[in-house]
Image (cartoon, grey):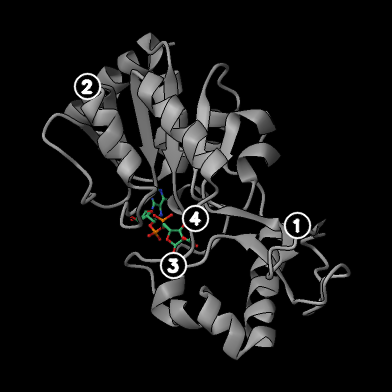
Amino acid sequence: MTTSEKTLLDFAARKVADARHPVSFSGAGLSAESGVATFRDKSEDALWSKFDPTELASQAGFKSNPEMVIDWYNSRRRSVAMAKPNAAHLALASQKHWVHITQNVDQLLEAGGAEPADVLHLHGILSEDHCNANCGHSEHVDISAPTALYSCPNCGAPMRPSVVWFGEALSQDVLQAAVSAIRKADLLLVVGTSAMVRPAAGLIDLARENSADIIVVNTEQSSTLMAQDIELIGNAGVLIPALFKALR
Ligand code: OAD
């Protein structure tokens, strides 16, 4: 680490240490070092460079080929089941009084020790299915051994993963809880997101409007960055623990 990088890290660490209402906002980059694929970055393994989101993550795609969609989610589930929380998850999860807003569906923050009540899943979770006709039925899924396409025992409609697909609304309860946390936040730590998907990414703007300090940790320069934000370029698994250790 160069002297200027160390100075910037210390400056960011001071903001973290002084924050009274800190919030993290994470994306797929947080779990990249756990071996979970990202969606859109320079990596050739990024999911949306290999697969078509309209076929695999939309109501239209599910209608036209439900088996293919479920098989794809089940392969992601099996890969997440083998993943372990990395140093960034562990460092975030060990902080008390933080709210963690995440776009990730892998629940690795909780696997790393975060209180489930402190984690807001904007885009849902892989470990649950619900009825695609919204009759209200949902089921826990063992992500290490997920079942193939099956029907809702209540109404016979196909069951689907409880994740948000393109064109679908986020859970209003979760979004409201995230907005409340952001309105209160004096610090937002943005980790490993391209910040291209709304309304999730709009939470960063809201935090800025509320004068929160923004720290962005990403392997590449982020499009979400504004002049007043603090940018730390590098792997989350290195920088997040360093951020919490820098002032000790
Ligand atoms: P993206 O794949 O769009 O962005 C991941 C970001 O993480 C990129 O900017 C990478 O540069 C960065 N990154 C990669 N490895 C990293 C590392 N080790 N440390 C730090 N940063 C790293 O993922 P998201 O922003 O989460 O939505 O994508 C948002 C949403 O788009 C997802 O929740 C998903 C997808 O479509 C749904 O499924 C609804």
Q: Earlier in the sequence, mark 4 or mark 1?
A: 4
* Label 2 with label 3: CB-CB less than 8 Å: no
Question: Disc 3 on helix, strand or loop?
Answer: loop
Q: Quadrant of ligand 1?
A: bottom left
Image quadrant where one finds the N terminus: top left
Q: Residues within 10 Å of mark 4 (few under 14, many from 20)?
A: some
The residue under label 4 is which amino acid type?
Ala
| Residue linked to disc 1 | 136
Q: Nearer the viewer, mark 2 or mark 1?
A: 1
Residue 96 is left or right of residue 195, and the answer is right
Q: Nearer the viewer, mark 2 or mark 3?
A: 3
| Residue linked to disc 3 | 167
Q: Earlier in the sequence, mark 2 or mark 3?
A: 2
The residue under label 3 is which amino acid type?
Gly
Q: What is the x, y in percent for residue 219?
A: 32, 50
Residue 155 or residue 21, whichever sits in front: 155
Q: Earlier in the sequence, mark 4 or mark 3?
A: 4
| Residue linked to disc 4 | 32
Q: Earlier in the sequence, mark 1 or mark 3?
A: 1
Gap between marks 1 and 3 measured at Cα:
20 Å
Residue 196 or residue 235, whichever sits in front: 196
Q: Residues within 10 Å of mark 3 (few under 14, many from 20)?
A: few
* Quarter location, residue 110: top right
Gap between marks 4 and 3 measured at Cα:
25 Å
| Residue linked to disc 2 | 7
Residue 114 is left or right of residue 32, and the answer is right
